Image (cartoon, rainbow, N blue to C red):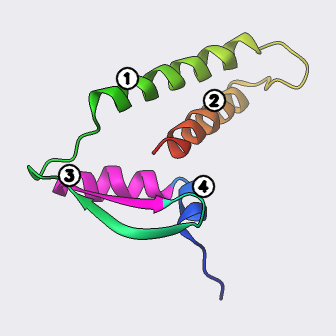
Amino acid sequence: MQSIDWNEISRRGLLVRINNEIMHPIGLAIFRDPDSGVSGGALVADDGVWQYAESVRTSLDKLVLSEISDFFAGIGQPGAPETLGEMQATLMARVESVMRDHQ
């Protein structure tokens, strides 16, 4: 049996899901050090409601929209996904990567 660190958990998209689906609704947010892959625990919202600061949401919104725009600009280029299923999977992977990297 092997173990994985919090960076790998994040890479697999699990940290986003754990936070969004379980922790945030109860006012908590697991955090990690991306350099070490170690988590120091969870942050506790002062008012019991976890929300990202408006500046963080605005920045992430811009990054996601930019990623979507870049994806569609590459359609039809060599190596670009061709089927609708490939396009969906590729776009979702790119968006999830942006969200993981900026959590």
Residue found 60% across the figure and 55% down from its top: 11
Q: Residues within 10 Å of mark 4 (few under 14, many from 20)?
A: some
Q: In the rendered structure, which disc, 2 or 4, sits on the residue that comes first in sequence?
A: 4
Kind of residue indicated by mark 4: Arg
Cα gap from disc 4 to disc 1, whole angstroms: 22 Å
The residue wearing badge 1 is 58
Q: Name the residue nearer the viewer: 31 or 71.
A: 31
Q: Nearer the viewer, mark 2 or mark 4?
A: 4
The residue wearing badge 4 is 11
Kind of residue indicated by mark 2: Leu
Q: Residue furthest bottom?
A: 1
Cα gap from disc 4 to disc 3, whole angstroms: 22 Å
Kind of residue indicated by mark 1: Thr
Region of the chain picked out in magenta, as a range: 14-32
Quarter of the image that includes the C terminus: top left
The residue wearing badge 3 is 25
Residue found 27% across the figure and 34% down from its top: 53
Q: In the rendered structure, which disc, 4 or 1, sits on the residue that comes first in sequence?
A: 4
Q: In the rendered structure, which disc, 1 or 2, sits on the residue that comes first in sequence?
A: 1
Q: In the rendered structure, which disc, 4 or 3, sits on the residue that comes first in sequence?
A: 4
Cα gap from disc 1 to disc 2, whole angstroms: 20 Å
